[in-house]
Amino acid sequence: MLQADDIRYLVVHCSDTPDQDGMGAADIHAMHLGFGWDGAGYHAIITRDGVCHAGRPEYWQGAHVKGRNHDSLGVCLIGRHDFTIKQFAALEALLLDWSGRYPKAKVVGHRDIQETHKTCPNFDAGAWWARHNPLAQKRAMVMVETAPIYRAPPGENQPAPAPQTEALMGEEVDLTAARQHHGYVKIALATDDYQGWIKAASLCAKPEKMTGTIQAIRTASCIVTAEPDVKSAPLASLSMGAKISVLATEGAYAKISLYGRAGAIETGYLPHHVLASRQINAGTDWPACAEVFIGAPYKWGGRSFAGLDCSALIQLSFGSAGYRIPRDSGPQQEFLKKAAITNAHAFQHFQRGDIIFWKGHVGLCVDDQNLLHANAYHGRVIIEPVKEAIARIGRTDGKPTRHIGADQLLKLLDNPASI
């Protein structure tokens, strides 16, 4: 029986069968039974369609590299030379998973670990992995719609705790000081320097050359479709702040790329109006960006239209208007304190764009009477009378701590030295 600490090599093989043959995982299993073995000798088999089939359990010693079966896991690609992009994408996902759970293991090809006349897997697996392993780079990209970020890595075989925040598709993460633990990696989110642990499988290598124009989503949410037609198949649901690469324009639609593994970049379509302009004017009505979230569910640590908290609402709205601010309400309050109202008008008179902070909570004024905020009391993003909100929150959390004035706020963000 293999123990996790025994695994020193992750070995890539190929079936060395003609690329056009329709060999499947069952055929490998039958072949190896014919050798007198206990079924397929590999721990995983990746067929031409990119499906990763389970072979032997990982605790069961394989039969794939003579002399090294006691300290290795093996995966076989069906084919000889012309492997498909889907196969390489599946291989990357598998190796990323295995590397996270067996951090001492090295990725090698069959020919690299055994004296053999075979050239299996017929490409340099180690060099390929060095290029495509997102954790081997200084920066990686989020390839899923949303990726939870945790304060500490969830324990193995334990339910994950509530996330501290979320990363969105297309955002970059800094891996300069990365550490790994059971499939999670320590990162800093490039958008706001937020540090935490993210699932390694949610990341892909940042392309050496980015194609198209990188633009962010400016609506609360949008659906990526397979064709420039609202009736075509949905591919992904993106939220405000997600970043995609715009490849071309087709009528009212933008053709975009969705980030994927091993160069398997899928294309889709979005209506042009959901994309933020690259030219952001000073004085943008950023509260209008927040208003599109009305009705979205409250989710502590959430950062998308599927669920978000009070400070995420503020950060995403500012981000859509072209301003970069911290993620959490405490750092936001400190960051914006130079624009605070300190006279008798504080907490008494309001205008659109004012921000009200409490200890652990934040909301924004949409006019002189009403506050917009994501809150657990209502369970969603809601507008309520600002003075009623101050009184209600005061009964449990105390008085508001800071009133940021809209006029001074934009001056501060446009020119921090002006205040």
Image (cartoon, helix red, strand yellow):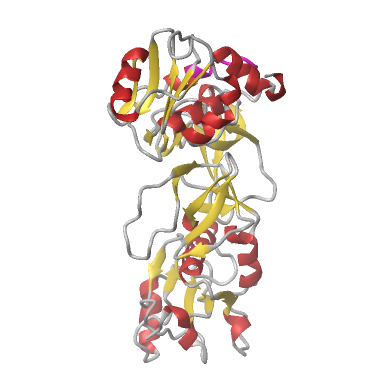
Q: Is residue 77 above or below residue 400?
A: below
The spot of residue 73 in percent (x, y) is 47, 78
Instruction: Specify the principal SS of the magenta part.
Output: loop
Q: Which residues are magenta?
A: 282-287
Classify residue 261 by image quadrant: bottom right
Please provide percent x and percent y for residue 174: 61, 50
* Residue nearest the viewer, comparing 167 with 412: 412
Observer-nearest of 17 and 173: 173
In the image, residue 165 sits, relative to residue 321, either above or below, namely below
Instruction: Please give the name of the residue rendered at 53% of the width and 35% of the height, measured from the top-left corner.
Output: 331
Against 316, is 108 above or below? below
Q: Residue at x 62, y 50 (%)?
A: 206
Q: Answer whether residue 160 is magenta in the image.
A: no
Relative to residue 299, is residue 99 depicted above or below? below
Task: Identify the residue at horizontal 40%, vertical 24% (top origin).
Answer: 293
Q: Quadrant of residue 272?
A: top right
Q: x and y percent of residue 98 in the render?
A: 47, 69
